[in-house]
């Protein structure tokens, strides 16, 4: 009822509403109570169903709140609910190339975390079906992700549906799209910052950016401990390190002023992330994440700040 | 609105202190004779660090990394060390976390022979 009234009264295409929702999500999501979160998800579904322009942006903001390496109930709830909207409203999703790419990037990454319990297995299966269908139906939209798509696909390559997809990518790329010439084409394409950033929650970004811009080298220990205690203290959370490293390599490009100061350098943070990793698998993935842009560096297209 | 005090300017006997600090460490709880729980926390701003004693629930809620505004605090010497307290009518409010630079040195709560001397001479305020 309220929604209908809101829709009738709105004269700006719900722009104010959308901005407000994005703002709440980005600044306050962690503090929201469960009932509020449920309401917000409901509101998102209504916005999507009415085809409000900009609802795809809200969808992406929602996806950003799903934390990597976190299998607590609330986080899984969010992952499940957003996926449900995207699956239900598939026709709507297909209208936005960016949303397709972001959704695939998000859920391909999350699949890695979802294993172990029956509930997580079930979620994983839905995520697999979702990603595979978008990859096969709209490959060139997913291609937009660039080389990190290869990295993500590698991490899930043992899953049968992805194993099959890999065979096509390697041996029969044209099956996926006439314009796709093969894995090399994808590896030569730099991944935009917006994808690297989308897998960090606003709070993670705020804290990492603070560390790389305000904390002096030598003073970082406590901040590292606090960050670690909040986001990297469980075995499941080690997968987050890759996302953090990709973020630091690809998104955090300090100015010359900061580089020449005694502010905590990027290599020190990355060193911390690599040396405190408690899982061998996660550690080797993290090391690969570090070198990803270097392996395929091309002076015309890539930024030296990525390596 | 009163201006904020910096940690380096805290001296024994000062009252009505308003300051913003970040919590570095929270210590163990000890029980007082009248059944309250006291916790000592090490807090800091860009000018140095100091210990604050907090009672009961508040002590349990404070976490390292919290950025807190203290209003109407006071400082005095306890066992030769300068310590901060929340006064009557004052409180501690969490206003953020993580994003504050600080300096751990100097530690203004280190045992200070001057303060010990003042106390034993009865001049302690």
Image (spheres, coloured by chain):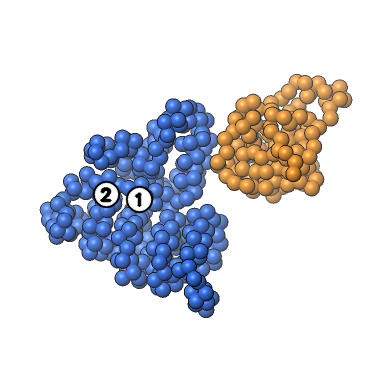
- Residue marked by disc 1: A195
Q: Position of residue A162 (x, y in %)?
A: 23, 57
Left or right, residue A52 beside residue B44: left
Q: Are marks 2 and 1 on the same chain?
A: yes
Q: Which disc number belongs to residue A146?
A: 2
> In the picture, which quadrant includes the C terminus of chain A?
top left
Q: Which chain is blue?
A: A
Verify CB contact (< 8 Å) between mark 2 and mark 1: yes
Seen from the viewer's position, the closer of residues A29 and B81 is A29
Residue at image point 59% right, 46% down: B96
At numbered mark 1, what does the secondary structure look like: helix, strand or loop? helix
Tell which residue pokes out farthest to the front in this image. Answer: A11
Q: Which quarter of the figure has residue A303?
A: top left
Q: Which is nearer the N-term, disc 2 or disc 1? A: 2
Chain of the residue where label 1 is placed in the rendered structure: A
At 40% from the left and 40% from the top, the residue drawn is A252
Left-right relation of B116 to A50: right
Q: Which chain is orange?
A: B
């Amino acid at each position: 009822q309220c929604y209908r009234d809101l829709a009738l009264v709105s004269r700006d295409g719900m722009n104010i509403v959308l901005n407000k929702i994005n703002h709440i999500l980005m600044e306050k999501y962690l503090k929201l109570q469960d009932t509020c979160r449920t309401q917000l998800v409901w509101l998102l579904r209504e916005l999507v169903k009415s085809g409000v322009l900009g609802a795809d942006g809200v969808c992406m903001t929602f996806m950003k709140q799903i934390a990597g390496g976190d299998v607590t109930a609330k986080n899984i709830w969010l992952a499940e609910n957003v996926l449900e909207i995207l699956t239900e409203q598939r026709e709507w999703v297909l209208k936005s190339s960016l949303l397709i790419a972001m959704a695939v990037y998000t859920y391909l990454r999350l699949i890695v975390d979802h294993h172990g319990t029956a509930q997580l297995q079930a979620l994983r299966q839905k995520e697999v079906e979702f990603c595979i269908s978008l990859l096969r139906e709209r490959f060139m939209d997913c291609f937009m992700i660039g080389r990190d798509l290869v990295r993500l696909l590698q991490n899930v390559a043992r899953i049968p549906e992805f194993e099959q997809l890999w065979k096509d990518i390697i041996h029969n790329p044209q099956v996926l799209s006439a314009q796709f010439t093969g894995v090399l084409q994808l590896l030569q394409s730099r991944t935009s910052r917006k994808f690297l950033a989308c897998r960090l929650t606003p709070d993670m970004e705020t804290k990492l950016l603070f560390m790389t811009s305000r904390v002096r080298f030598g003073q970082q220990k406590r901040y590292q401990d606090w960050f670690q205690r909040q986001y990297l203290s469980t075995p499941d959370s080690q997968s987050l390190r890759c996302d953090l490293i990709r973020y630091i390599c690809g998104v955090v490009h300090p100015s010359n002023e900061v580089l020449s100061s005694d502010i905590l350098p990027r290599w020190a943070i990355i060193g911390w992330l690599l040396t405190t990793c408690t899982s061998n698998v996660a550690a080797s993935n993290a090391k690969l994440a570090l070198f990803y842009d270097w392996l395929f560096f091309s002076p015309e297209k890539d930024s030296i700040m990525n390596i | 609105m009163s201006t904020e005090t910096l940690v380096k300017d805290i001296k024994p006997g000062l009252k009505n202190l308003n300051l913003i600090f970040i919590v570095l460490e929270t210590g163990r709880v000890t029980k007082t004779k009248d059944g309250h729980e006291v916790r000592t926390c090490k807090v800091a701003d860009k000018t140095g660090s100091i210990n604050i004693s907090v009672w009961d629930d508040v002590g349990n809620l404070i976490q390292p990394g919290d950025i807190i505004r203290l209003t109407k605090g006071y400082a005095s010497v306890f066992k030769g060390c300068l310590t901060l307290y929340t006064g009557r009518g004052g409180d501690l409010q969490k206003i953020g976390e993580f994003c504050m630079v600080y300096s751990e040195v100097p530690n203004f709560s280190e045992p200070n022979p001057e303060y010990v001397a003042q106390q034993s001479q009865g001049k302690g305020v």
